[in-house]
Amino acid sequence: MSDTVLTPAAAEPQEKSRRWGAELSLRWRQHAGILGALALFIVLYLFYQLNHPRGFTGQILIQNANEVFALALVSMAQTVPVLMAGLDLSVGAVMTLVGCIASHLVDGSPAEIVLGIVACIAAGAACGFVNGCVVVYGRIQPIIATLATSAIYMGLALILRPTPGGKVHEDLSWAVTSDLREFAATFGLFDDGEAAWLQPFAWIPVPLVLLALIILLVWVPFTRSVTGRTVYAVGSSESAAYMSGLPINRAKLAAFTLAGLFAGLGGLFLALQTSSGNADIPQAGAYTLNSIAAVVIGGTSLLGGTGSAIGSMIGAMVLRTISFNFRIFDVAPLLQPLFEGLVLLAAVSLGGLKLLRLKNKLEVFR
Amino acid sequence: MHEPAPFFALENISKRYGGVHALRDVDFACSRGSIHAVLGENGAGKSTLMKIMAGVVQPDEGRMLLEGMPVSFPSPSAANRAGIVCIFQELSLMPELTVADNITLSSPPRRFGFIDGRAQRRRSEELLARIGCEDINPLSRVSDLPLSRRQMVEIAKALGRDPKLLILDEATSALTSADVDRVYRMLFELKARDLSILYISHRMHEIDALADRCSVFRNGRHIETFAKGARSPDEIVGLMIGREIEGQFPAKPRRRRPAPLLTIRDLSWENRLNGVGLEAGRGEIVGLGGLDGQGQKELLLALFGVLRGVRGTVALEGDPMAANSPKSAKSGRARMALVPEDRKSEGLILSMSIADNIAMASLDRLSHGVFIDAGRARRAVDRAIEQLRIKVGSASDPVSTLSGGNQQKVVLAKWLATEPDVILLNDPTRGIDVGTKQEIYRLMRALAEQGACILFYSTDYEELIGCCDRVAVMYDGRIIRELEGEAITERNLIASALNIAERRETAHV
Amino acid sequence: MSRTAETMTAPRSLRLGRDDKPVVFAAGFVLLILLVGTGYTLYTQGSAPLLQPQYLLQQLQVGSFLGIVAAGLMVVILLGHIDLSVPWTLTAAAMMATAVGGPWAIPAGIGVGLLVGIVNGLGVAYLRVPSMIFTLGMNAVMRGLMVAHTGGFAPQTAATDVMQYLAVARIGGVIPMALLVWLAVSVVIVAILTRTTLGRSIYAIGNRERAAYLSGIDTNRVILIAFALSGAAAGLAGVLLAGYSTKAYQGMGDAYLLPAIAAVVIGGTNILGGRGRYLGTLVGVILIVLLNSVLSIMQMPEAGRQIIYGCVIISMLLVYGRGDRVAA
């Protein structure tokens, strides 16, 4: 391969636009995973909406958003350990535990509710932090460490809620599972939701707004921080990160804590959505495994170092939209699990096809 | 000559790994404004010394003085803060991250507490320009860059830490010759700026070109430090080995060229191999020469069945054969063996035992049906260790405990156990001490005498001249010239490799 | 004369090697569990049922189903992969065995497991889909197939006599047949891992597939065989379980995946592959089974079980499952 050295001064304007174009295609290629997932989601969702008997209504959108939120958040939680080439098998359990906590605390006076919400968020983060400590200081592989802690968290959840039950504040529950207008109306904000500037956005379901806020206020700053970049670095090459003097332990602890935080937020919403806490082991397991699938569909590599929580959120949307589609096509309920499984298998196998084109077989192995 | 005051000094440094003394009571010092070369065989302690200076490991005894003040570095970042930066043989880059991220990650430019992407990029462009690599796009992923470019990014990263003492540990072994020149220029420039530079290398010509002072280590001890030119290359090698070396290369037998065993015609793959034609017979050592990256490695991989979509023919005594996997290459009509480029990740399984590694390619010969004959395996391993004189404590120790030279012997032992007809060697002596190199040259000649056909890729001209019966010089994926016997000289090799290049360049004008 | 090739035969020295430590510790923990349980029963009931041979044999009989699953799973984990399709492979094998009936019941069941394993192997080795994801998908597909096949209900067909015999019968009225089946599976797995080329290849690939490939090992084929073994083991376990319960039922395999993984890991096998002894997995299974039964005797509620389960795994791994510090 010959070395070409560009002299910076030569042919400036043409150079600049050519460079700009080259960079755009570079960025395009680097984010191929997420963009592919987004395209897949758009296709599936449009298909769903176009074929829906009742057509495109706001109500359907709200319902869809509600069903997606918890899985989206649990998938975002799963993303962070996966970026470090690890796995968190306790995300479903943390979600369940925080949901059970919420079913006890998120009720009563506004102050109590706020405290309850804060307690839930703190609980999620604390569970994540414990995971991080076991991995960092115990030096136990994440997949096994979180397998063990998931049992502990489920046990705690069962103590809090041996049977499904509990209560959450009804208005809050109603508000977060509706659109912005309803949210404002419930709490007497913005002229009870009738304010003029709100109207273009009033139809947006609250869960989607919450997702956007979480991404903008938590995820994006995280990726732009040194700790966040270190998470990517550790996933790419832990020894290189160490040699570069990066704060590895801090990054691992932060990663698991963030995962716990996201999973907790998912659990909080689930409790608000169902108005109860349910320590259901199979359900927790299903959420965990689905979160892994969502992460993969969203373009994050299980080998670490590359990917994004945004992709995993889209992956969760893809998964949910598949089941929405089954619903409206009146696929025999007996056949639904089969189709879901086949689609999942196909979706993740497509990623594998890329490897078939590799010309140097050594590149297959890491 | 006036002795400059030492910038960094080590006194009575010792380091043990288990029962092995990596460093024994070492006194060492280096000064600003000089390039100081460090020489020694593998296991001599050079890398350990650098690791201690760079804060990667801690010494068991002794102390370090920076500008006269005692210091200790519990981690690489502590050493970095003191201005000591090390460029290691194993890269410290994160492949999935961008060049800009890698270069600036440990102390990125920040804005409101967050990483400032634009400033990060500008800084990377500056640093890359300083080493003459403006063509590397800071936004590209490191994993998309070839090995030589990655090493340049590593160097840019080290520069970005604003070092006062720069340590290079075999940092040029992966570079193309153009990049090596860039590194030389950078080092001279840094020396002029009063940096202290430590340079570990096995390549005499590099040390000749760069160093002001040389230090020789042997068996964990500092033997001698002298100014450039004070000792001849022979004396230096003598200091390193501690014994007199007879002729470096074994004698080449004078005989007529044998009938071809392996006939390659029109071999092509992607744009890396463009119609390679070559013949090699039993008893021949055929070298692959030319500038780096002209397809030599790809040729070996293609022959061994690792590449997909290879066109052209490979024939064995007239009959075509095509290996589509290492397994079929190994057990085909002509048994092939490949000693790969990177022994640590491709040639060996470091965490498994020496015995396991030696037996890995010949398990089918050591078994009755599905079951391994433990006795036969044991005897085969013992035989191999004895034959190649591999220095082991016990064959059930993990192979990671061996020195680089002995590790490479294990790789060779593994393949010799399959009794190969064709042996493909991908730069087998890179990063290996002089003593073991000579043993490998003798082994190669002995194998050829026993009837093997050897294809030998080396980045070292001296090896090609000293070992090979013929050298095929490659350029742009094809063989442009074959040199035989007396015609194999450094001048001819370089001329062949560059000749075509010159002609091509004039064509562009 | 140096001690050579020790890794290819059973280790002879009595020194505690790195791979022996987990086995010893796990065995010690088993004893601990027995002691604590016996202490509890002595205190509350005045008797020591845990130490009765009949009781222990009964527990081992139930444990043999888990043990067979863990045996197959260990081979896959040694490669650095994982098989999450065990639950529904087991269930599908059980359902197919009872549906087919007659002399072909058992081969049908094991055959189903083998088939699923082969598909898993193809996906992981040739399509290079991460094993976690592919086997997850296969699990969902098998569940879908069984739900469609049975209409969502438990199949009414009963297990054949042979199946019941294998699962329930006792040789000489004492030794459970299921235990002997487990023993047979163990012997086969140990033989494969320690004495065959396949076994060496598995360890090699688990440590570094790239080097194994370049040494001429057909890594794709080895991966395929390993998953086939895991699937067949799950199938066999399903057949036996159906024999034990006299019929197959929905979700019968769900309770076997995580305990099997835990047993393999507690037994000292590295979850990233390349290291581990079968004896450890054996002891790990016994540990989990005994832990379960002691907790049952104590009538520990599910919440307590889960917490204790998690704590046991973590504490055992803290002792011997710790990785190295990251260093150059």
Image (spheres, rainbow, N blue to C red):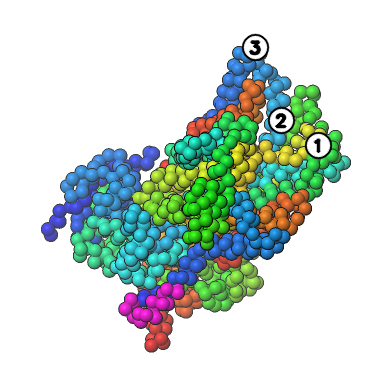
Q: Distance between the residues labelled 3 and 2?
A: 26 Å
Decide if residue B450 is in sight here. Answer: no
> Which disc, if any, is residue C247?
1
Numbered disc 2: secondary structure: helix
Where residue A290 appears, as percent x and y from the top left, is: 61, 49
Where residue A35 appears, as percent x and y from the top left, is: 54, 64
Camera-near label (2 vs 1) is 1
Label 3 vs 2, first from the N-terminus: 3
Residue A70's place in the image compared with C163, above or below, is below
Q: Name the residue under label 3.
A: C46
Q: What stretch is highlighted in magenta?
A: A7-22
Q: What amino acid is found at the position of numbered circle 1 in the picture?
A: Lys
Chain hosting mark 3: C
Q: Residue at x 51, y 46 (%)?
A: A187
Q: What amino acid is found at the position of numbered circle 2 in the picture?
A: Val
- Dot 1 and dot 3 within a common chain: yes
Q: What amino acid is found at the position of numbered circle 3 in the picture?
A: Gly
Q: Which of C300 and B196 is in front in this view?
A: C300
Q: Distance between the residues labelled 2 and 1?
A: 16 Å
In the rendered view, does B105 fall on the left or right side of C70? left
Where residue C239 appears, as percent x and y from the top left, is: 77, 39
